[in-house]
Amino acid sequence: MRSIAPFPVDWVRIVELTPGPASDVRCCALIPIEDVDTELARPQCVAREVGEVEIFDGIFHDGMADRFGGCAEFFCQVRWQEPATVPAVEWALPFLWYWRAIRRGDQWIYLDSAGRDVELARVRVAAPDDYAVEVRALALRHYLHLRGRAMLLAVQVDQDHPGTSEVEREEHPLACGWASMEFQVYDYDGADGGKPLAASSLHGQYVVLPADGAPGPAWCTDEEPDDYPEFIYGLNASTGRPLTVQPTTDNTGVDGSPGPHFWTRIYFNAQVLDRYLAEPRRYTVTGSRISCLHVWSLSIGRTSDNLVEVDLYDLSRMPWREWDHWRAHNVAPAGGDPDEGKLRRERLNQVASSPDVVRDIRAALGRANNASQRRLGWPLWRPLAEPTATEWAALHPPVVSDRSALQGPLLTLSKVLVDSIDSSRLRKVLRTEPHRDAKSLALLQQYVDELDGPEDAVQPLRELQDLRSQGGFAHYTGSSADKALARVAGGATLPTEIFENICVKLIGAVDSIAMVISTATAG
C-alpha cells in the first residue's frame, strides 16, 4: 500500500509480475491530465489495452494507443518470446530520448545538470513470470509535467494468509481524485478441497501526477537552487573577519549588465581539483579550465601561491550542485599574485595564455614527433595505447602536499617519454650497429650523436627513468631514492614545484632533440 501514491518522491514500480502466494501484477500507460477523472471511472483500466499489435475488424492497431479510441498511450512493458529465456524491457522511446538515457546492465542512467550519472530506471528479471520495472519518481513526474500527462497504473495484488482461520468476505472500495480501487478480504477452498484459506486482494487503478520544478536532464534544465552559499573573497582590514558574497544574479548581473561583484575573485585550495582529476573520462582539467563532457565548463586561474581562482560570475554559472564541493575548499586570498593570463584574457580581451607546464610538454612532444615525421617518415614516440592515452590526456600537476601524489604524474611521464620511444624503428636507422642490449634511451642518444647533437640530450629522460627504478614512485624513503629525487627536483620541496621543475627539464630535452632532427633535415 505504501507504494501506491499520487505524489511519489522516490521510486515508482510501473510494471510487475510476481508469482504467488503473494502475487503482484502492475501495468502502466500515459493519459492526458484532463482525462484522469474519466479514466478512473472506467470499470476496466485502459493501461491493459496498450503494448500489443492487433488486427481487429480489418483495422491494424499498432499497440501505441488504446485500440478502443481512448487517449491512453504506451509507456513501458516487459515482453518475452518463447523460447527466449530473458524477457525484454520495452519503452516509449521519447522518454529515453528526452533523458538521453543509456542502458547499463539492469539500469538506465542519464546525466544531471552537474554532469553526473543518475539512475533513471531499473529492472529486476528473475524469470518470464517474475520481474519488475521501477522509474525514479521525480524524473517521471518531471516528464509527465512537460507532456501534460498523468501515469495510469493498473494494480492487482493478491495474497494468501494460510495462518488465518476462515473469514467473512469484506469489500472496501476507494474512490477519490487519484484512485479507483477495492480492497477485499475473503476465503476459498484450499487445494484438493481442503479447509478454507483466507486471502486478500487489492485491485483497481490509480494515477501518478506530474510535478512542476522537478530536476531535468543536463541538456534541458533550468534549475534554481533553494539557497545560495556564502563564499569568502577577502578579509575586512579593520576586523579581520571574512568578507563573503553569494553567487546570485543580483551580485553578478547578467551578460551585458555586470553586477557589483561580477569580477570578484573567489579563491580555493588546489585540492578542489581532486574530484575532477579522479575521473579523466568525465572531466578535463587544464591550467585554465575545467570541462565536464558537453555539460558545463569553468574558467579558472592559478595564483603564484598555487590557489585556484574563479570569478564570481563564472562560479554563478556552474551547476549549483557543485557549489558545496567548492565551498568546502574556499579560502581567503593569501597574497599571491593573480593569474596574469586569465586577467588579460577576460578583462582586457587580449590573446594570452596562463602558465601550464603540461600543455607545454605536450606541445614539445608534438614538435619532436613532427620533426621525426619529416625526416624519417614516422614519429619518434609511438601513438599511445590505453590506458596510457587517457593518463596522458588527464596529466596534471599534484594538488596536495604529500609527495606520494607525484607517483601517478611521474609514472605517466615515464611511460610516455621513455616507454613509448619507437626502439625497433630507431634501431634500424642508426648508422652504427648498436649493442644488442641497448634500451630506448641509449638508442635515442646514439641517434642524436649521429646527428651531431649534444652528448647529454637525453639526460633528463635518464633521470626520470632512474627515479622510476629507485623503489618505485610511491616511496621516497631510501637514500638512493632521495638522491634520485633531489637530482631532478631542482631544489624544490613541494610536489607541485618538483613536478614543474622536472617538466621544464624534460621540455628542454625534447625540444633539443627536435631541434637536432630539424636541423639535420634542413641540411
Image (cartoon, rainbow, N blue to C red):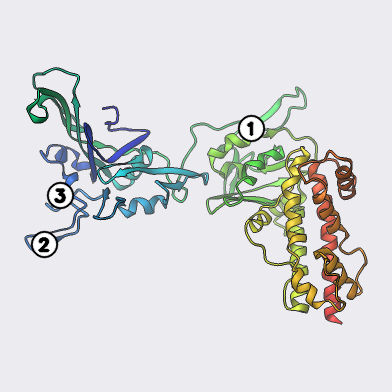
| Quarter of the figure with the C terminus | bottom right
Residue 385's disc is: none
* Residue under label 1: 328
What is the x, y in percent for residue 507? Answer: 82, 60
Q: What residue sits 26% from the left and 46% below the top?
A: 128
Q: Earlier in the sequence, mark 3 or mark 1?
A: 3
Q: Is residue 196 visible?
A: yes
* Residue under label 3: 70
Q: Earlier in the sequence, mark 2 or mark 3?
A: 2
Q: Secondary structure at mark 1?
A: helix
The residues tagged by marks 2 and 1 sit, at their Cα atoms, a distance apart of: 64 Å
In depth, the one of 167 and 350 nearer the eye is 167
Q: Secondary structure at mark 2?
A: strand
Q: Are marks 2 and 1 in contact (CB under 8 Å)?
A: no
What is the x, y in percent for residue 329? Answer: 67, 34
Q: Secondary structure at mark 3?
A: loop
Location of residue 400 (image quadrant): top right
Task: Tell me: residue 345, above or below residue 8.
Answer: below
The amino acid type of the residue labelled 2 equals Ile
* Residue under label 2: 59
In depth, the one of 485 and 427 nearer the eye is 427
